[in-house]
Image (cartoon, rainbow, N blue to C red):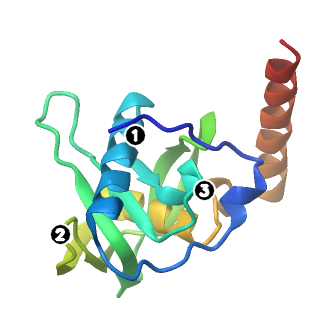
Amino acid sequence: MAIRPIITAPDDRLRQVSKPVASVDDGLRALMDDMLETMYDAPGIGLAAIQIGEPIRVIVMDIAGDEEEPAPQYFVNPEILDPAEEMNLHEEGCLSVPEFYEEVERPASCRVKYLDYDGKAQTLEAEGLLATCIQHEIDHLEGVLFIDHLSRLKRERILKKLKKEQRLAAAE
């Protein structure tokens, strides 16, 4: 397992639409293991493959709290089914938009169809933080960042600050 560099906005690679995975094999499981290690190291609760430069439809998550046992989840080719009409407001952050947190409105619950770590078809009923996180990560697979759900003014302010921080870091 290896920790991989996480791509940060405004990198254009984050705007790619990820391609479906043909099959779950040892190579893909190794990638998912790297993704999980990278996510834990960051630290975060979710990571899409595109965030480490792999434009494929793969997500890893672990929403267990600090005092709980780790509970990693792996989603290959995830697809949201039946998003609730009821909406939920949740503060979101993103490893690709570091240090920024904003409230985002999303469906309060949904079902998710996907392949697991072993390539078996699964369906998951998600609500609360799990529903928010899975929707956030699936957005990444479509080239969408959580800041795209904000007003244009907030989004531009965040991107301007990120660009400035990247310029300053490059000058050091």
Q: Is residue 17 left or right of residue 11?
A: left
Q: Quadrant of residue 102?
A: top right
Q: Secondary structure at mark 1?
A: helix
The percent position of residue 147, horizontal first and vertical second, equals: 67, 54
Front one among 13 and 71: 13
Q: Alpha carbon of mark 3 to alpha carbon of mark 1: how far?
A: 17 Å
Circle 3 packing at 10 Å, graded few (<14), some (14-19), many (20+), is many
Q: Can you identify the residue that label 1 sits on?
A: 39
The type of residue carrying mark 1 is Met
Q: Determine which of the numbered discs, if any, sits on residue 118 in the image.
A: 2
* Relative vertical location of residue 20 with respect to residue 167 in this rendering, above or below: below
Quadrant location, the C terminus = top right
Q: Counting residues from the N terminus, which is met first, the one under dot 3 or under dot 2?
A: 2
Can I make out residue 84 in this image?
A: no
Name of the residue lying farthest toward the left: 69
Q: Secondary structure at mark 3?
A: helix
The percent position of residue 151, horizontal first and vertical second, equals: 76, 58
**Mark 3 and 1 residues: CB-CB less than 8 Å, in contact?**
no
Q: Determine which of the numbered discs, if any, sits on residue 108 in the image.
A: none
Residue visible at 38% across and 54% down in the picture: 31
Name of the residue lying farthest toward the bottom: 82
Can I make out residue 102 in this image?
A: yes
The type of residue carrying mark 3 is Phe
Q: Determine which of the numbered discs, if any, sits on residue 146 in the image.
A: 3
The percent position of residue 130, horizontal first and vertical second, equals: 30, 58
Quadrant location, the N terminus = top left
The type of residue carrying mark 2 is Asp
Residue visible at 28% across and 69% down in the picture: 25
Residue visible at 31% across and 53% down in the picture: 30
Residue visible at 63% across and 58% down in the picture: 145
